[in-house]
Amino acid sequence: MNDKQARETKIVGVAAVIMAGGRGRRMGREKCLIEFGGKTLLAWMVEGAQRVFERVIISGPAGLARPGVPAFPDERPGAGPLAGIMAGLKAAGTPWIMALPCDSPFVPELFLRGMASLASGHDVVVPRRGEWFEPLHALYSVRCLPYVERLIGQGERRIITLYDLVKTREVGPELVSRWDPHDLAFFNINTPADLARAQAILAGSRS
């Protein structure tokens, strides 16, 4: 299989889960429905994921569903992103999920494919930058589900708490930079200033 065929082949066994349950307080409105480059941020994320993964779902209110892309609300509203991971693991119907935020429109396809290639032999595959993890750009095995349920039952909200309980593969900057040479995979839109920067990046890529 050549590079072009690899890019065109959709990954099976891993469902992309777009995490769209946040309220976007710093933006003053629901982030996933913000218009950017002629479509919503949610549409950017869904369409990008569909180029890579055979199955894409949304972790968020049912009203966010799109044709062929169902949405599943959290069973534990207010429990944070960990509840979104739980909803995704239960709804995906695949051995793995790739968690993605609703507001990172520049995640490269190569990054998604590279992360998915590391799944074998682990329960979590997560990028790490210095002392910080990127838990919403990470892979989670269905084997994580009982641990996630237990943590939520204990009132835990931090996804990173899971990593000490399962087989976790940390992905360092050497690999990430190979898959993300322009350092945009983790760029997300939290504030109006971030949105303005994203618009400038998009304009530059189209010029």
Image (cartoon, rainbow, N blue to C red):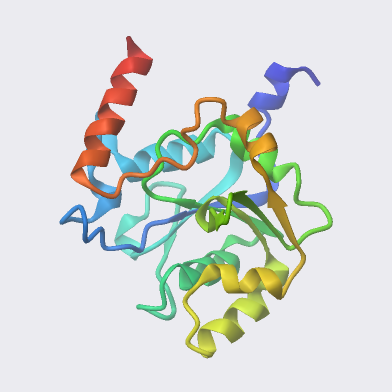
188 vs 9: above or below: below
List x then y, in percent, for residue 115.
67, 43
Q: Which residue sits furthest bottom?
A: 154
Q: Residue drawn at (32%, 9%), measured in percent from left and top?
A: 207
Q: Quadrant of residue 63?
A: bottom left
List x then y, in percent, for residue 174.
68, 35
Can see residue 37?
no
Q: Quadrant of residue 133?
A: bottom right
Left or right: 68, with 35 as reference point: right
Q: Which residue sits furthest right?
A: 121
69 vs 2: above or below: below
Q: Residue drawn at (53%, 31%), measured in percent from left and top?
A: 108
30 vs 61: above or below: above
Residue 115 vs residue 76, the one in the foreground: 115
List x then y, in percent, for residue 106.
43, 33
Q: Which residue sits furthest top?
A: 207
Q: Residue drawn at (60%, 52%), measured in percent from left and top?
A: 15
Left or right: 164, with 35 as reference point: right
Left or right: 135, with 166 as reference point: left
